Image: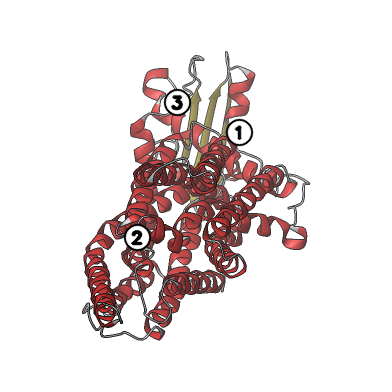
Amino acid sequence: MYSEEWSRNRQGREKTVITNFSFSQLPEEEKTGRRKPHSAHDSDESIPDDRYHSIYFAMLLAGVGFLLPYNSFITDVDYLHRKFKGTSIVFDMSLTYILVALSAVIVNNALVERLSLHTRICVGYLFALGPLVCVSVFDVWLELFNTQQSYAVTLAAVAIVAFGCTVQQSSFYGYTGMLPKRYTQGVMTGESTAGVIVSLSRIFTKLLVEDEKNNTIIFFLFSVSMETLCFLLHVVVRRTHFVRYHTSRARQSHSWLKGQINNVTTQKHSGYQIHYDSSAEEEDGMASSMVDDADAVNLGNGSHGDGIYVRFDVPKPEAKRSWISVKELLGRRCAVARVIWPYMLSILVTYFITLCLFPGLESELHNDTLGEWLPILTMALFNMADFVGKILAACPYEWGGVQLLVCSCLRVLFLPLFVMCVSPVQRPLLAHPAWPCGLSVMLGISNGYLGSVPMIQAAGKVPLQQREVAGNTMTVSYMAGLMLGSAVSYSTYSLTSQAHSSHTTLKLNSTLTLHNYMPGH
């Protein structure tokens, strides 16, 4: 038993600190578990530097890795339209991806503290690579399936890719939340880079290889190679001193805080008694040494006048839980959501409006002069503009959460403008190809910027030990916006389907008319 009484007189008032520690029967691991984690200032270890920006580049390629497979499926729009004529294949793929992805985000949030980060990311890569390879070989190259089977196989592949890539994506946002802010921006820039790479790949394969089957095979094999490169880079980068330093620092802080909270919540059953009054904390060097400034926790509610009274009656050792209850998981996420809700709504609205138009409506744009090249060009322009927007998000400007939400809501003006590019059916109000191309650029820049800034800034609004949870919570909002936008985009398919049927009828009537006037008929 150890006890100490200490009194101090300051500003004419008596301050008394009584600290009572009972450490009999306390195992050594219990003692060490209650110490605060070592910070960078407590050790001689210097903060590692990202030499040559190699870690940033690897995180950019990580962003490429979890959107490249899906982009590979939807960007090959000319092949899809030829193979599945008269169907809503792009809309179906988009909705399938979003529904499965939202489920994957929820599963990943449940497993975020039960499976290791590396395990979740590696499983995600395997789920993304498998379907991409299978579709490339068995469907595109060997053509083992008929049209109906191929349709089902394509949607099944998109569903598996959605699950794997979303687990990667959600995990990577938690991952980069433990690193400096610029690495979250790097991952989000990588998402746009994936679209740019895939769009340019499709354009060049279509230009250089005339046969559609061969250029599609080359296109998919290039995507498989890029995805494999991203996977290998992740395996290498996670072992670097830079990444290990930042992730271990965040996890130590999180483990210490979790231990303090668990001690408080179990004191009734275990006999652990804690009394702590913070009224004179700044005047007491010993009390402040027990609670780190960044990880301050209210350890109890006992207050005794003007003094500080801290007493630890250590419980008997008992088995530790390895699984966290659902109530605790929800409680932590609700606490984080109360802090970052404007950023959650902002990213939800941004991606809701984008998915109402892209890729569904943009993939169905047609022009007599450009033909199937118009949707390929508008998709490429969107992806390039999105890339620029995410680079602009790196500019050091601190937005307010409500400001971001208002700007995201203003993007609703894109909805009627894009509808006028396809309606009325016979003569759209914005019929010239320059309209959809220009609107795609503006949609892409605003999506890149307003989709990145909330994700980057939200992590800085919560303590270090809660940043992985904040990253996963923001991803839930992101996926909710994608799902709602994808569902609403089906309403635009009725416009494009009427346009297609009318275009086909006019083309058929023109052909019959010319056929009747040909000599010999």
Residue at 41% x, 24% y is: 267
* 271 relative to 396 in the view: left or right: left
Could you tell me which secondary element the residue under label 2 belongs to?
helix
Q: Camera-side residue: 145 or 120? A: 145
Residue picked out by circle 1 = 35
* 73 relative to 92 in the view: left or right: right
- Residue 102 in percent (x, y) is at 36, 46
Residue at 29% x, 73% y is: 412
* 322 relative to 342 in the view: left or right: right
Q: Is residue 136 visible?
A: yes
Q: Amino acid at mark 1?
A: Arg
Q: Dividing the picture into quarters, in which one does residue 5 lie? A: top right
Residue picked out by circle 2 = 348
Disc 3 + disc 1, Cβ < 8 Å? no
- Residue 108 in percent (x, y) is at 44, 39
Q: Amino acid at mark 3?
A: Trp
Marks 3 and 1, how far apart at CA = 22 Å
Mark on residue 17?
none
- Residue 320 in percent (x, y) is at 49, 20
Q: Camera-side residue: 506 or 486? A: 506
Up-down relation of residue 287 to residue 31 (above or below)? below
In which quadrant is the C terminus drawn? bottom left
| 10 Å crowding of disc 3: few (<14), some (14-19), many (20+) | few
Point out the frontmost of discs 3 and 1: 3
Mark on residue 323?
3
Q: Amino acid at mark 2?
A: Leu
Could you tell me which secondary element the residue under label 3 belongs to?
loop
Q: Camera-side residue: 42 or 381? A: 381
Could you tell me which secondary element the residue under label 1 belongs to?
loop
Q: Is residue 396 visible?
A: no
